[in-house]
Image: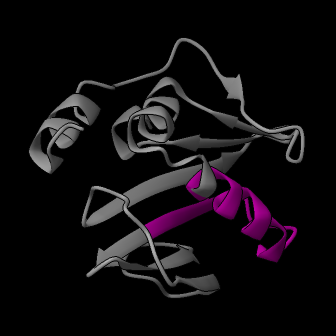
Amino acid sequence: MKTQDQIKSDLNQFIGSISYTKFSPLFPNVVLTDGAKYLADECGAYWLMDMIASHLPSLPASEYWAIAILTVDDGKALFTLADDSPATKIYAMQGVDYTDFPLDEIKLYVSYDGEFWCVMLPSEY
């Protein structure tokens, strides 16, 4: 497996997306950018994409934007879905009792275009 620095360096290469991937039949209206898919593939983090998608109904109907943050410490993690960083509104939080996710923290943007929620790296926005 790559080191944290190698993964971060790879993620910094994603500055846009030319394709969008539907990743789960459970969430047909959620797509991943190339960078988010790379993160899911490289870090074995489709569970994180599922977690993000499963909490999207927590957003108010008028909200079309959110930030998903996963913070990892000593094999445990805290997931937060919020309006901004730092958050003024927290829409959802979930603890993860065990994870081998290789990064200390990852921040992803989630945007709705009226049909699909798109999960992306900040550099792809």
In the rendered structure, the answer to whether residue 31 lies left or right of residue 17 reads right
Question: Which residue is found at the position 46% from the left and 53% from the top?
Answer: 108
Q: Quadrant of residue 56?
A: bottom right
- Asked whether 73 or 20 is in front, the reply is 73
- Asked whether 27 or 123 is in front, the reply is 27
Where 93 sits versus 115, above or below?
below
Where 113 sits versus 98, above or below?
above
Q: Is residue 89 shown in magenta?
A: no
Question: Which residue is found at the position 28% from the left and 34% from the top?
Answer: 11
In the rendered structure, the answer to whether residue 4 lies left or right of residue 27 reads left
Identity of the residue furthest to the top in this view: 18
The residue segment tinted magenta is: 48-69
Q: Is residue 67 shown in magenta?
A: yes
Where 75 sits versus 108, above or below?
below
Where 111 sits versus 38, above or below?
below
Q: Position of residue 114 (x, y in %)?
A: 85, 42
Report the quarter where the N terminus lies: top left
Q: Position of residue 46 (x, y in %)?
A: 60, 46
- Asked whether 67 or 1 is in front, the reply is 1
